[in-house]
Amino acid sequence: MTTERCREWRETLGAHALGQLPEEERAALEAHLEGCAECRAELESLAGVARLLPLADPERFGTAPAPPPSLGDRIAATIRAERRGTRRRRLRMGLAFSGATAVAAAVLAIFVLPGGSNAGPEQHIAFQSLPPELHIGATLEPHAYGTEIHMYVKGAPSGTLCRVFLLGSDGTRQPAGSFRYRWGDDSDATLSAALDLSRTRAIGVRVGDRTFVAPVDSSEAT
């Protein structure tokens, strides 16, 4: 089990050891622990610490050391210097504001005002060559801000992290967000990416440690 795959699970191990993890998250974590020896070992080490916490005696802790007397003066001097730098940056920004206003107006005219939208027909994507137990589909909707993605996943192990991305016509990868699959559910997630659908070559989803990619017909979005 790779560290990257387990990173998000390990963030919940401490709460689980203390008995503070919500029921729905606990069930997903326990399903993950059944197949991950590394996370089970880390949970065991945290459980030992959790068992010792009630034995700690706060009265035996020493008094925290007092900060040096000059600390307050150094902090105040730093704040004054930062304020002077902020005023100089604001002056430079004010000189450039008139030009920036014209650029912003042009951007609004393209992407917000009527006639500037590049919205077109939505596309329904069916992923092929999947394992027998796994079903993945997507609907892509072009918008002026990019692409809205409706993902459908069924049949993954409970708690599996699903990461969605778009591949541009130049091969660049544009992340679109992530969600966790819950066992027994038809997981639907609505995500978005800044990449225009007309410049999208494919859509991909990483389900756990497996990645699946389906082509997109960018000509339909033009």
Image (spheres, rainbow, N blue to C red):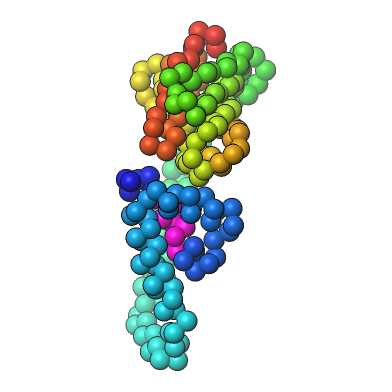
Which of 133 and 77 lies nearest the eye of the viewer? 133
Where is residue 162 drawn, in percent x and y? 48, 36
Where is residue 188 drawn, in percent x and y? 60, 33
Question: Relative to residue 6, is residue 48 depicted above or below?
Answer: below
Question: Relative to residue 25, is residue 51 depicted above or below?
Answer: below
Where is residue 36 drawn, in percent x and y? 37, 50
Q: Is residue 212 magenta?
A: no
Name the outermost residue toward the bottom. Answer: 59
Which residue occupies 49% across, 29% down? 133
Which of 216 and 160 lies nearest the eye of the viewer? 160
Q: Is residue 60 left or right of residue 126?
A: left
Q: Which quadrant is home to the C terminus?
A: top right
Can see residue 142? no
Q: Which residues are magenta?
A: 7-14
Name the outermost residue toward the right. Answer: 114
Q: Is residue 11 magenta?
A: yes
Which residue occupies 48% across, 50% down? 31
